[in-house]
Amino acid sequence: MPETIKCISPVDGSTYASRPVASKKDIEAAFTRAHAAQDKWKRLPLAERAQYCNAAVDAMLAMKDKIIPELAWQMGRPVRYGAGELRGFEERARYMISIAESSLARIDPGPKEGFLRYIKREPLGVVLTIAPWNYPYLTAVNSIIPALMAGNSVVLKHAAQTLLVAERFQKAFDAAKLPKGVFQHLVLSHKQTADIIAGGHVNMVCFTGSVAGGAAMEKAAAGRFINVGLELGGKDPAYVRPDANIKHAIENLVDGAYFNSGQSCCGIERIYVHKKVWNDFIDGFVDLTKTYVLGNPLEEATTLGPLVRPEAADFVRKQIKSAVRAGAKAHVDPRSFALDKPGSAYMAPQVLTSVNHQMSVMTEESFGPVVGIMKVSGDDEAIDLMNDSPYGLTAAIWTEDADAAQKIGDEIATGTVFMNRCDYLDPALTWTGVKNTGRGATLSVIGYEALTRPKSYHLRTKTS
């Protein structure tokens, strides 16, 4: 029997989808098609590539009513929020299509007598996108659409937890009548994925996942001299200054901490609050947290679904218990959330105070509905604590002083600095990280630079 990849639903522990992994013959054929199709695809006018990509976006959106419950079953996000991912998918796709012409335009260094000089951006070839389960459409579209617009072909390998997302992408591109071989998806094991990269089948890898997974990507690509874009872990901080709009900060930071059950690389996992507004912030934050409804994600009333698997929830529970044993105060009684039980994927949200950076919950990625909050005396202390992390994806500053936010932002080692918002990607801005969060960039003009290579033309027009 061939090996199969299974999606075990966090809703009830059942097998929601199962697919056989691709055979060696299937893999070889797919990449042969991808390379052959790319050679023709890159020669199409950019406007034609845009028509195909826009049609695929239209086709994906037409499947919304099926996609939303599928997401709930596959990874547990409540159906009331499912449409939001598709809105983000469309926003990013349409924007990257709209800026392709300017992003891929020739670079003119200026006139020089007797010469024609310019730089072109050429496609890399075949791009392998390896996408995660937590935001399966949003993370995948970051590389898929701009890779295609740049003239590459794409092969998508999606996470086991969201097997059906890859099939939805395939259906959308097929409905758009994209030429055969330009976009394909494969069901692969981890070993097969590594073998594909090490075997020289692809010209770039776009990976979103764990730090360990990123290290595996780099190991597989060693000696191949290919681009490897990595978006890995996060332990994103927020700082609430004394001049912040506290009501606004509470509403948005609670959402930033618990949306998607905290399973977001750029979700808020630690908060530093100025001592002058500490009491008001904590009281409001805890009160709002207690209003969440933990339940079946297929029910409209649910605002907090299960974590992706019971083991993930138990990891977060262990972090909380360890912190409490070390002196932290837990503000939410999990017994008030009926579904929260040891060994269950369903987990109540938690707020911890009296925490410090000797605790795992403040330093190690939780990827669950828990946030630790510390009191600080000023900007310098907050900056030191925000930077005290092996990760650097985003940081959020809550203040009415934009100059102060920019000054603090200059001192923080992250890829993105927010002011009065969090947990959001603006496609006009590049998405990148530092330290163990990874390397490379997606979205914006810079995202196109990562998916192409420069080629210089130095033409002498006068020889006498």
Image (cartoon, helix red, strand yellow):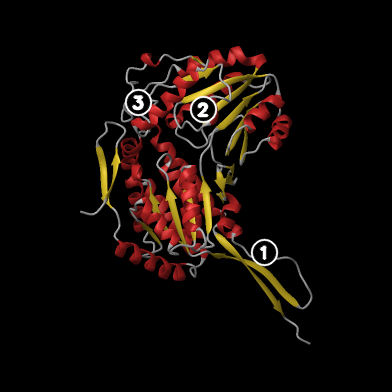
Q: CA distance from mark 3 to mark 1?
A: 53 Å
Q: CA distance from mark 1 to mark 2?
A: 48 Å
Residue at which label 1 appears: 107
The label nearer to you, 1 versus 2, is 2
Residue at which label 2 appears: 360
Q: Report the residue at 58% width, 30% height from top.
A: 237
SS label for mark 2 = helix
Residue at which label 3 appears: 346
On the image, the x and y values in percent for residue 138 come to: 45, 44
Q: Does 263 appear above or below 157? A: above
Query: Tag 2: residue type?
Result: Ser
Query: Tag 1: residue type?
Result: Ile
Mark 2 or 3 closer to N-term? 3
On the image, the x and y values in percent for residue 457 come to: 66, 73
User: Mark 1 Cα within 10 Å, few/some/many (few <14, many 20+)?
Assistant: some
Closer-to-camera residue (166/379): 379
User: Mark 2 Cα within 10 Å, few/some/many (few <14, many 20+)?
Assistant: some
In this view of the protein, can residue 140 be seen by the observer?
Answer: yes
